[in-house]
Amino acid sequence: MAEESNSPILVDQCQNSSFDIKKRRRSSRTPLDKQALLKALEDGSAIYIRQEGYRSKVWSGVCRISVGDTIVDNYVVCQGCEKLLAYGQGTTSNLQKHIEICDTDNSRPTKGSPSTKDPKRRKTIISKSPLMKMQISKKSKPLAGDIKVPSSIFTSKSDIRKNLLYASMNLFLTDSIPFSTIHGEGFIRFSQALVNEAAGHGKFDVSCYLPHERHINAALSELHTTLISQIKVLSAESKSNTVSIEKWTGSGDKVFLCIMLHMVNKSFNVRTVNLHSFLVQDNSPQHILNEINATLESFKLSTANGLYMITSDSSLIPETSRIEGLNSYFHVIKLMISNTIKNITALEEIVNQCTAVINLLKVDERQLNIYVIFNRKLRQYNPSDPSTLSVMLLSIIDTFEEVIQAAKELTSNQTDDVQLVCLFHTNRTKEELKEVVDMFSPLMEAIELVKDERCSTLHYVWPIYLSLMESYDVQSNPDSNLQAAIRKELMVQLQRHFIIQNLHEVAAFLNPLTKDTPWLDKLKRDTLHDNVLDMMRQIDNPKTSDIRSSQEQEGISGDNIEANKPLVKQQTQSSMSGLNLAKYFFGQNLKQVKGVKEELLEYIETPKPVVANDLQYDIMKYWSSCTSCPTLRKVARNIFSIPASSISCERFFDKFDKFSDNLNHDDKYDKELCKRLFISYNYGIARQETMSYSS
């Protein structure tokens, strides 16, 4: 009870006439000193007075402070964020500005609100900072497992929102990056903040504390801008246009590294994160526990096999502004921030069970999860001791043969606690690298056999492929023959093991390898590029080797093929996946690589099956978002509203000619490409109606 007596009491002005401001003595001549006010708030001698009957939105949004018989004139308290606000005599402009920008729409106390009207539920104290801190009840039970209530209590609503904002950024960045794995730190931080707040209030509305999507995006943008400037500084210091990952490993900030990874791959996009849209309808504790139990079993099943990797399909689409198709781990977050969780016991149980899931993914020397390269470096590489990197990588390579054998045993259900290891690059000799290539094939076979239906082979191939690429890139005197052998073996294995439905991921998988990779210039017009073209043509014509051969000649060498050769093929899942493949691979490079543009035009303008029209549509749609010319983007968007009829096509070309007159001379090449793409697309529409091309 002593605690409650020291807490400032919130009363309504109408509750007691003794609290009437007009009947209180003002201290206008001698304003109360800020330190004295803080001391009064801390020892409980101050009273908050919520004013009523004011027409002004400013005074209805703040509380006056009463100390003894004195109404403090130079300070008030915001009802939303609980900050001390200073104001001068005769003006409230600063108060009005604060009220307008204060994000307290969902959290401002209203008349009759149990969290503000009942003094017992408003346990606030003041420390040396002007922000009021939420005091955690000593009666609340400590959390089990790794989740513990921190010694420093969480601060006011404003600071709680700030904590949740950072946690939301961490969740978004670490769990929505393609091919990333579960981290858990962001989730623990997020749920811990909610648990502590719930422990202090007993009951609370989670939605009051969720950061708005615009705040998350603003924070991400600010961090993005900071990173750009720091990367420029590092690049200038190293006198190079590239920044190595190793330079950033000393920061110790995973969110920082996650954005850095996006920057290196030139794929960073601030996407809209609408946490409020994740709210579920049925938020009863029993329903939540049932969902969590099902999720937990899913985690246990997959992590026992060592083959569960968290990805989000929508995160593979750079131009998207939504996060859809969230995985089961993110589904846990959705449940955590459900509309209202009023049962603190159920909330703690959810956190504990999810923590147990995260603990399953902890890494030790013999059981290694498949992790993205920079995450492993972050955990085990000590910048002050460069030798730790090579020692760590060598130890992983040394266990590779054992993991291969364990994976084979796993396929026969002889063991269920072995997890596959990711192969990382190291300064090995050429002979040792050749041994790695020889071991690659049985590993792929083992992965194929134990593959989970919820995961594609690509998820497991990605870190191995990337590691092998780096393995021969870091060699001081690389052997070109060995590099060619590795490339060939990798592409053979990839083509052999990719299931058709997942080929749209091939492009997203290849995109990071076509950016700032040292061997891009050598490989762009050679193995990688040709293999991607080959895979795309195999998708379009999987059973017609002759046609595929002619298409290879057309796409790689630029030779003409028979323009009117009929191609008949049913629309299948494989063809639709091929559209996405072309969309990602070519769309990402259209504005950069002129040769790809020319080669793509040759491919598009060659007669294709009916479904190839969708391919052209997807390529155009993505290309229109890449081009730097605003007029061309406007023209490209116009086509999406045109019905599939030849009459509307003619109308469109009339409109296009008017737009093209406004193009600058510098856009001449883009203008020609745009027009040819549109012509090809609309010819495809006409053929779709008449089943024949018109020239």
Image (cartoon, rainbow, N blue to C red):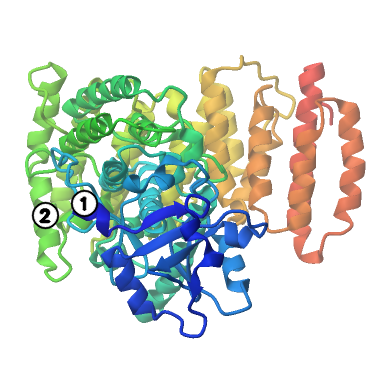
Question: Which quadrant would residue 187 be assigned to in this image?
Answer: top left
Q: Considering depth in this image, is 615 or 95 the residue closer to the camera? A: 95
Q: Amino acid at mark 1?
A: Arg
Q: Is residue 334 left or right of residue 538?
A: left
Picture layout, residue 507 above or below residue 154: above
Q: Considering depth in this image, is 32 or 138 the residue closer to the camera? A: 32
Q: CA distance from mark 1 to mark 2?
A: 9 Å
For the point 9% across and 29% down, which residue is it?
A: 405
Looking at the rendered structure, the number of numbered marks drawn on it comes to 2
SS class, disc 1: helix
Res 39 label: none
Instruction: Find out whether the residues at labels 1 and 2 contact each other: C-beta distance under 8 Å.
Output: yes
Q: Percent x, y for residue 248?
A: 29, 66
Res 392 label: 2
For the point 51% across and 85% down, which residue is it?
A: 29
Q: Is residue 208 left or right of residue 99?
A: left
Q: Amino acid at mark 2?
A: Met
Q: Considering depth in this image, is 153 or 248 the residue closer to the camera? A: 153
Which residue is labeled 1 in the image? 376
Mark 1 or 2: the one toward you: 1
| On-image quarter of the C terminus | top right
Q: Is residue 485 visible?
A: no
